[in-house]
Image: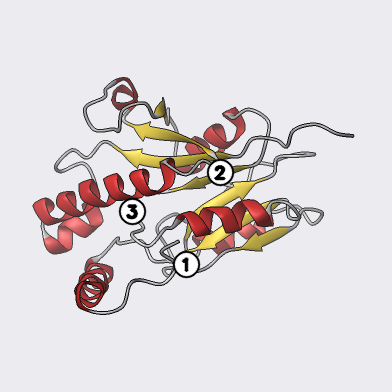
Amino acid sequence: MTGRPEARHLLIFAKAPILGRVKRRLAAEIGAVPAWTFYRRNTGAVVRRLARDPRWTTTLVVAPDAAARSGRWWPRGLTRTSQGRGDLGRRMDRALRAQPPGPVVLVGSDVPDIRPADIEAAFRLLGRKDLVFGPAADGGFWLIGARRRPRFPYLFRNIRWSTPDALRDTLANLPADLTAGFVRVLEDVDDGAAWARYRRALKFHATGPAPAGAA
């Protein structure tokens, strides 16, 4: 068979950066304003960094639903859709299934070190794997991708979200005949300890070598 390759679809899950409604666990430790400032700036940086890459099409999948209809927080010209109702698993599953044919990768917007090279690595893995995950340092995952053919099962039953078991629980739901690959481990900034490491990294990069993986 010949023909053009299937399109690649990148989904960025994000919340409207409204003070008091984002990064609540982080806000409980460092304060609402610093947590909101981090989320607003980091979301903008991640979206700009990933959405301009021509190797995939990018869609913002946002919450609350009304934020998908507002251009107040988002770059112009970028496709937006709403996350809809349900827990995180239901919302991710719905978004992954809703895309046109082709491999799809989904990431959050609160991981400072995501680079286009990470997204490209995930799509390359989907050339030979059914699923791909980006493990998070806290036991969750910052990326999930799916080839979606010949089938894509529901992966998010009985997941202990926001615990060190989230990725392990998800992998336990994989049927035996589906294969999974993994990209590098990254850290999302969800608590005070992660915030402190993030701040140290910022200071280092301001005075030291450029961050690895900046491609």
Task: Determine the secondary structure under disc 3.
Answer: loop
Left or right, 129 with respect to 42, comes to right
Left or right, 179 with respect to 88, comes to right
Q: Position of residue 185 (x, y in %)?
A: 49, 69
Q: Which sits in the foreground, 149 or 20? A: 149
Q: Position of residue 114 (x, y in %)?
A: 42, 58
Q: Which mark is residue 110?
A: 3
Task: Determine the secondary structure under disc 2.
Answer: loop
Give the Cα distance between marks 1 and 3. 15 Å
Nearer the camera: disc 1 or disc 3: 3
**Residue plotted at (35% across, 71% down):** 211
**Residue plotted at (42% across, 41% down):** 51
Residue ID for mark 1: 139
Q: Quadrant of residue 13?
A: top left
Establish if 138 lies above or below 119: below
Give the Cα distance between marks 1 and 2. 29 Å
